[in-house]
Amino acid sequence: MDFNFSIIIEYADLFIKGILITIQLSLYAICFGTILGLLIGLGKISKSKWISFPFKCYIAIFRGTPLYVQILIIHFCVIPLFLDSTNAMTAAIVALSLNAGAYIAEIFRAGIESIERGQMEAARSLGMTHVQAMRYIILPQSVKRMIPPLGNEFVVLIKDSSLAAIIAAPELMYYARLMMGQYNRVWEPYLTVAVIYLVLTLTLSFFLNRLERRLKTV
Amino acid sequence: MIEINKLKKSFGEHEVLKDITVQINLQEVVVIIGPSGSGKSTFLRCINLLEDISGGSIHIQGKDITDKSININEVRKSVGMVFQQFNLFPHKTVLQNIMLSPMKVKKISKEKAQEKALKLLKKVGLEDKANVYPDSLSGGQKQRVAIARALAMEPAIMLFDEPTSALDPEMVGEVLEVMKNLAKEGMTMIVVTHEMGFAREVGDRVIFMDGGYIIEENKPVELFTNPKEERTISFLSKVL
């Protein structure tokens, strides 16, 4: 196997562009996915079956079907219903956020349910409303416990954003495929992006670990 | 002050409270004793509606708290509760534990809430612990903070759910001492406990519960020295 570094250098600019788009995609999905996840998670733990049912369905659908399929459906079927022309970046952000929302909802639910029942009872017995008890007592405690699984989900999101290449969103994987097409080489593009993804996820893990340690000492 | 009429509570098929009718007067200290599973704790938790009741009625200061139109949070403001497991908020300091509800529920200013909290901490003998987290307190100290936290809402009634049962024996005394002082100040209190000494010394009335019923109630001296019901006699012979 001969490894041609010169074509990687030739593609360096495009890879950097791709990295920026990958980071952008991931950040959007992390933000929207977290907000969505909190809402869906709170909806799912509702005592009323009528409220919790649609949220349970949402989670079942998005966790039970491949992200690959979700991206294709959202890009080619759903987005055209609302916009005149479909847009790969929009579709990728929407698909990744909706998908992440389902997983993050389960993280929020587990985090909230892991807080002893006595905490809610103490807060309520002091006259707080359910919402106040959630906001001041339950959520601040559960967020600490959610950091490790949330970090995990964020790492998964960075990696999964590579699937957006199939709808030609110009992220990292897209340029790898471009390079493979142009030179008909496999090792150089795929190994390069593998290393770049590894660096991205390790960097994120590093910061999450530090955050986790800092929260522990508080 | 509290009027409970034909109170019933079931968990699914299991009927825990069968027919509880009792009145509690202003400034009275009522101690509830009985074997575990007799429904004492459930009874207490019904009084501030931590449990939905299955039948009967509860009036507090003349208000029917089981009426759907009543704001349950308003009711709870006037009913303080102390739990067996303390249930302090671990992510807040002792002072914050006490200040939080007055600030958020009663909308009292931070300065006033803090002043009040420090006063209460002094009362329970823990003014030097204001800025530590509950984790670093002993069980007895935690329970005293929990009492201060409940008092910060200036409740008309205090409910104690086995407040010393999770404590090491040497710490029971300090918590009972705080409760005694509270009783002396004229707080209306309902105390579920296994501390017969406390019941005898501080209680105005002792209620013996078993199997979801009130079996017998009387002045402490009467009930302890001259119990009338078979089940009371058998229970007291085991615990005294």
Image (spheres, coloured by chain):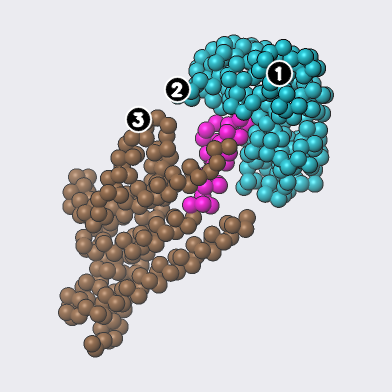
Chain colours: A brown, B cyan
Q: In this view, does A18 lie to the left or right of B45?
A: left
Residue beneath the point at 48% across and 52% down: A146
Disc number lying in front (2 or 1): 1
Viewer can see residue A100: yes
Label 2 vs 1, first from the N-terminus: 2
Q: In this view, does A207 lie to the left or right of A67?
A: right
Viewer can see residue B100: no
Residue beneath the point at 40% across and 46% down: A105
Residue beneath the point at 40% across and 50% down: A104
Please rate how many residues cluster around mark 3, counting C-alpha atoms within 10 Å: few if below 14, some from 14 to 19, many from 20.
Answer: few
Circle 2 is placed at which residue position?
B13
Give a yes or no on whether discs 3 and 1 share a subunit.
no
Q: What residue type is labelled 3?
A: Trp
The C terminus of chain A - image quarter = bottom right
Q: Is residue A200 left or right of residue A216?
A: left
Label pair 2/3, CB-CB below 8 angstroms: no
Front-lying residue, A71 or B40: B40
Q: What residue type is labelled 2?
A: Glu
Q: Confirm whether the magenta stretch covers residue A41.
A: no
Up/down of B56 relative to B111, above or below: above
The residues bearing labels 2 and 3 have C-alpha atoms spaced at a distance of 24 Å
Q: Confirm whether the magenta stretch covers residue A135.
A: yes
Q: Which chain carries label 3?
A: A
What residue range appears in magenta? Answer: A119-146
On the image, the x and y values in percent for residue B51 come to 54, 25
